[in-house]
Image: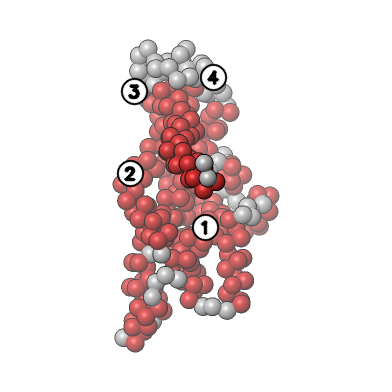
Amino acid sequence: MSPTRHVNSRHGVWRRVQPVAAILAVVLLIGMPLWIVVVTAGKSQGEALNPDLSLPTTWQYAENFAAVWEDGRVPAAFFGSLLVMVPAVIGVLALGSLASWVLARRSSRLMAVLYALAISGIVLPPAVVTVVLLLRQLGLAGTAIGMIGVYMGMYLSTVIFFVTGFVRTIPVELEEAARVDGAGPLRVFGRIILPLLAPVLSTATILICLYVWNDVFYAFFVVGGRLDTLPLNLFQVASAGLYLENWHLIFAYVVLMSLPLLAVFVVAQRKIISGITSGAVK
């Protein structure tokens, strides 16, 4: 067998094995943990002492969700999460898209340096101690406004990274035509650029919502004990012993906490996929 034919044969075997390996990896890394969470959330306390893949003898979703809803202060934590997440996402998308438009349309050494600094936040996480001390100096420690500012500062780099490359694919002639008609910069952005950014902004929205909704680390240091959010509340009630060894309640809380984002993803999945693929094609 010639070397070329041998290489082609190996590539052919890999093409047949690759889909099977990918499916197995998804099942092991995502499917099994998800199955354990969903199944354990419907078990009794005795059956859930050692979470495994087995089905419960009798499903107890209603009882477990009712206990979590009442004892875990889910309604207050839900509205606390919304109070922080919605303004943070809207603010970071607005500022990030405007900054991306400027960075994409102006080519100079200064803009290149500013772009590098703007996206450096993706790989350089903020120092928690410094953030907390700064918020105390500003009188924003322990407040929803302070938490919103932290999230906006953390994820502004993500939006700029996503949107800047997308803006560069938009023809400049569209903006020039609007300026000829007498439109100012903000009107050009709002009427021409922003509608075209809908796919990529949808993708960025889902990612940032996921990050903010599930965050417990920064929320613990900034608003811990002053404002309830769903992940922070779960951490507090579990560490206080309310859910000690009650894995069925912990996983029931996790399921309830995941439902809003799951609903958003199901509704917006087409825009998310179009945002990713359009950016890749362009």
Q: Residue sitting at 45 percent across and 42 percent down?
A: 12
Instruction: Tell me, yes or no, if residue 139 can be seen here.
Output: no
Task: Say which of 20 and 96 sits in front.
Answer: 20
**Labels 2 and 4: the sequence-earlier one:** 4
Task: Give the structural element (helix, strand or loop) at label 3.
Answer: helix
Q: Nearer the viewer, mark 4 or mark 1?
A: 1
Q: Residue sitting at 39 percent across and 72 percent down?
A: 170
Task: Give the structural element (helix, strand or loop) at label 2.
Answer: helix
Q: Nearer the viewer, mark 3 or mark 1?
A: 1
Above or below, comparing residue 128 to residue 53 in the picture: below
Name the residue type under label 1: Thr
> Would you name the residue on which mark 3 appears?
62
**Labels 4 and 3: the sequence-earlier one:** 3
> Would you name the residue on which mark 2 appears?
266
Q: Nearer the viewer, mark 3 or mark 2?
A: 2
Q: Residues within 10 Å of mark 3 (few under 14, many from 20)?
A: few
Q: Assess whether mark 2 and mark 3 are in contact (beta carbons under 8 angstroms).
A: no
